[in-house]
Amino acid sequence: MTAPLGQTLRIAIAGAGMSGLAAALALARNGFTHIHVYEVASNLGFVGAGIQVAPNLSRQLQRLGVWEHLADDAVEMEAASVRAGATDEELTNVKLAHVAERYGQPHRVAHRAALANALYEGCKAAAPSIAFHFSTSIVEIDFAHHRIQIRQRNEEGEGHWVDADVILGADGVKSVVRKCMLAVHGELDDAEDTGQSAYRIMLRREQLAHDPELLTMLDSHSTFRWIGARRHIIAYPISGHTIFNISTAQPDTNFAAEPTAAWTTRADKAAMCTLYADFCPAVRRMLGLVTESEVCEWKLRVHRPLRTWVEGHVALLGDACHPTLPHLGQGASQAIEDGAVLAAVLSKLTDARDIHAALRVYERLRKSRTEFLVEQAAASGRALHLTDPAAQAARDAAFRRVNEGPTDSHTPDKTLENNANPKNPDRWLDREVQDFVYGFDCVADAEGRWGAYFADARAGAQPTPTT
Ligand SMILES: Cc1cc2nc3c(=O)[nH]c(=O)nc-3n(C[C@H](O)[C@H](O)[C@H](O)COP(=O)(O)OP(=O)(O)OC[C@H]3O[C@@H](n4cnc5c(N)ncnc54)[C@H](O)[C@@H]3O)c2cc1C
């Protein structure tokens, strides 16, 4: 496809993470030829961890032409097991066979590096339309004159200004672009500390070789979630069953003393094992196998919903505007969807004077949807981490009721009372949430709504929620 303004608009993207790479690639595939990606890191040294590749993400990766780069790494999931952390009792086992049938793609999991690399390979193939500038950070935005101030690592002074027609803030949860945008209105940037942190661990097949139970899990097509008061662990096989990926969530103690400093750190294995000492033997053995130097801890942060994602010719995407707790497995997927939708709306433009209106359309298409998912992820965390025994018992009863999913897969019932389709406390396994997330094609949605939304945006009309 060739966007009418593809040869003329200069696009500057802050950040070469999931959303920045996806936006760059989608723009190039829509015919934009002047795309500059500025990344503070010296290269794409992607942090290793597992990532859920749900149907809505696979759909966009296929549209972006990069699925083949991920295909060998991805593992199809056929079931999701939720277990009591202390006893290993299986509370529910949700079959995922319906996913491919219902949403056109199976549910998969993969290595985060493989996903990022797939997007990067696509971007490299789109050269020279996309140019990467590594070791370069965006430090300031001039909203009135559509300029960004960039500074290269080791550069003396304040850096230099670069003109751009569209500026995309894909610079993650610590976004500088968001901070600049809020400052325009005298608002403070206040990323919220969730009080939670996450260990992210990967065990290689040879580390599990002597443990038949763990090896069976590695060879399975299942995710395993163990839950306990204030904590949980999720594990699943990635990279063609060669790696068992483990991610946890627990109260943050290591970062708490330094709220503004580090967000990721090498963590203490002994502290981690102590924290999960009351979990079942399988979990304890799993954590015990981790190499001391390979325990990585992430601080989990979110941000209150922003009043707007758009200022002039500048728009935010991904974690910069909707950081989402990992419990729903949708943060990267939604970031990539943002990039795809931005490209879809910008490619419709025939007059550069309408850039702001197009960005407003993007915001209207994405904001309420992603904010709903932010809340669903938080709700999952609250349910999984319950501490009150009576509330835990009610939750576990709800898990047992959804054991095999809804009996009628085509007419979801919205009430908890009706056992035909009770809500799943683990929201990513809930059929209604899956319908909302997995069944959605963000680009088709953008195409369908563009005309009406663009007319509203040009007229300055107030958007209405899309969810
Ligand atoms: C423990 C954990 C587990 C997760 N599991 C999942 C999962 O299973 N599935 C899922 O979909 N999501 C998951 N996520 C969320 C997912 O990782 C993020 O939502 C996703 O990476 C967001 O993409 P992004 O492009 O917005 O930001 P990022 O991927 O963080 O990229 C931002 C980029 O901007 C760069 N940058 C920052 N500041 C500047 C600047 N000033 N100038 C230039 N460059 C800059 C950074 O170096 C970085 O490369 C998980 C997150 C965590 C913490």
Image: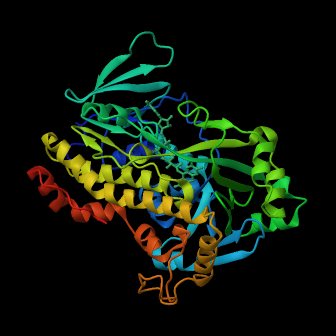
Q: Where residue 251 appears, x then y in whole percent?
A: 63, 49
Residue 451 image-quadrant placement? bottom left
182 up-or-down from 336: above or below: above
342 vs 90, nearest the viewer:
90
151 up-or-down from 442: above or below: above
366 vs 266, nearest the viewer:
266
Q: Residue at x 45, y 48 (%)?
A: 323
Residue, far right: 210
Q: Where residue 216 appears, x then y in whole percent?
A: 80, 68
Q: Residue at x 56, y 53 (%)?
A: 69
259 vs 421, nearest the viewer:
259
**Colouring:** rainbow
Residue 217 image-quadrant placement? bottom right
Residue 340 as seen in the image, left or right of residue 351: right
400 up-or-down from 373: above or below: below
| Whether residue 274 is visible | yes
Q: Where residue 150 appears, x then y in whole percent?
A: 38, 22
Q: Where residue 112 appears, x then y in whole percent?
A: 59, 50
Residue 44 image-quadrant placement? top right
Q: Residue at x 30, y 23 (%)?
A: 162
306 vs 467, nearest the viewer:
306
Residue, far left: 459
| Whether residue 3 is visible | no
Which quadrant does the C terminus fall into?
bottom left
Residue, far top: 156
147 up-or-down from 71: above or below: above
